[in-house]
Amino acid sequence: MSSRDASAEKIIRAIHALQLPPVQIMEVCGTHTMAIAEAGIRSVLPETVKLLSGPGCPVCVTPAEVIDSVLELAMEKDVIVSSYGDMLRVPGSRPGDSLQRRRALGARVELVYSPVDAIGLAEANPDKQVVFLGVGFETTAPGTAAAVLTAQERGVKNFTVWSMLKTVEPALRALMAMEDFAVRGFLCPGHVATILGEKGFAFLPEEYAMPAVISGFEPEDILLSIYLLLRQIAEDRPRVQNEYTRAVSREGNRLAQEMLRRCFEPRTDLWRGLGQIEASGLGLREELAAFDAERRFTVAHLPAPQPTACRCGEVITGRMSSCECPLFGTRCTPEDPVGPCMVSSEGACAAAYKYQTV
């Protein structure tokens, strides 16, 4: 069965026919999170099947103390901070304090649509230091790498990247190591898989006996991927299945993989909800240190803020649904967000609020 020759109704019937005992599965892609909520997929699944949202939103996994450091950098004289739209609205540890607010206070903060746009911003402002906030997983990391190499080639001296880029595999390993982890299978991120290929998720069945399906993004894609995942669980035959064959190959995008190797090296990084994870971040290589904002500005890493009522960390690790957060829909809304899960266009709380599904 493929998503092209199977109607949604047919797939739903096949899912119900499996008659599984209670089981939890998890998607780890922000685009999947939003697509699942928009299509109302949870509402058509059996009551015994619970679909959880994992750490698939790059903005959401960026911890508050890192945002606090960014906010301090934004106030430095002659610095222009640039990034994607979601990052401008993400609050730090103090409610309402964001890059958007700092811009209102006089900081130079610019919205860009790609890292290369930030290079153009640097060339247009030679008297300023332009810092691009590189946020994302393996999907966006090649674009950031390309920008760094382009800046090097052009000799742009006033452009740097603050790499907040992260990799998916170490996060999944950390997630599965959690004491209360009870997920039986993963819907793997199709966008990341276009870079890593099917082999990028082989560790799940090979080392953890964890079923895995790489999914596309249409409702039929996701439903079929859920069916394939549940069938693996029912048959106790864990493996990697690629539903998204129209975009994902076995080996992935080797050019993009080489770009990542040229620019980055693994480093320990901090994740919201998961803490420090070894080799989970992408730091610029020593030979590209001139383009590393953290080195150029000796960025202060501020201490962890005091815990708040925001439960984004629990939401993105599957320990809590959005509606179970005490702030959801009351103190925390898209118009006045407290946590990044409500800010990001890929956040679980934003999806649940917009489509009123949890």
Image: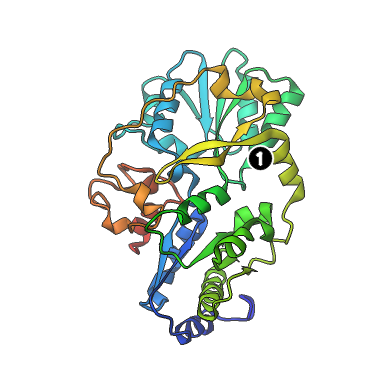
Q: Quadrant of the N terminus?
A: bottom right
Q: Nearer the viewer, residue 206 or 54?
A: 206
Dot 1 falls on a residue whose secondary structure is helix
Q: Position of residue 321 (x, y in %)?
A: 33, 59
Q: Is residue 275 left or right of residue 189?
A: left
Model colouring:
rainbow
Q: Position of residue 252 (x, y in %)?
A: 72, 55
As displayed, is residue 105 above or below residue 226?
A: above
Q: Amino acid at mark 1?
A: Gly
Residue at which label 1 appears? 143
Q: At x 59% / y 12%, what residue is drawn?
A: 127
Q: Position of residue 176 (x, y in %)?
A: 47, 56
Q: Quadrant of residue 65?
A: top left
Mark 1 burial class by Cα count in 10 Å: few <14, some 14-19, many 20+: some
Q: Position of residue 237 (x, y in %)?
A: 58, 75
Q: At x 60% / y 29%, what residue is drawn?
A: 118
Q: Quadrant of residue 142?
A: top right
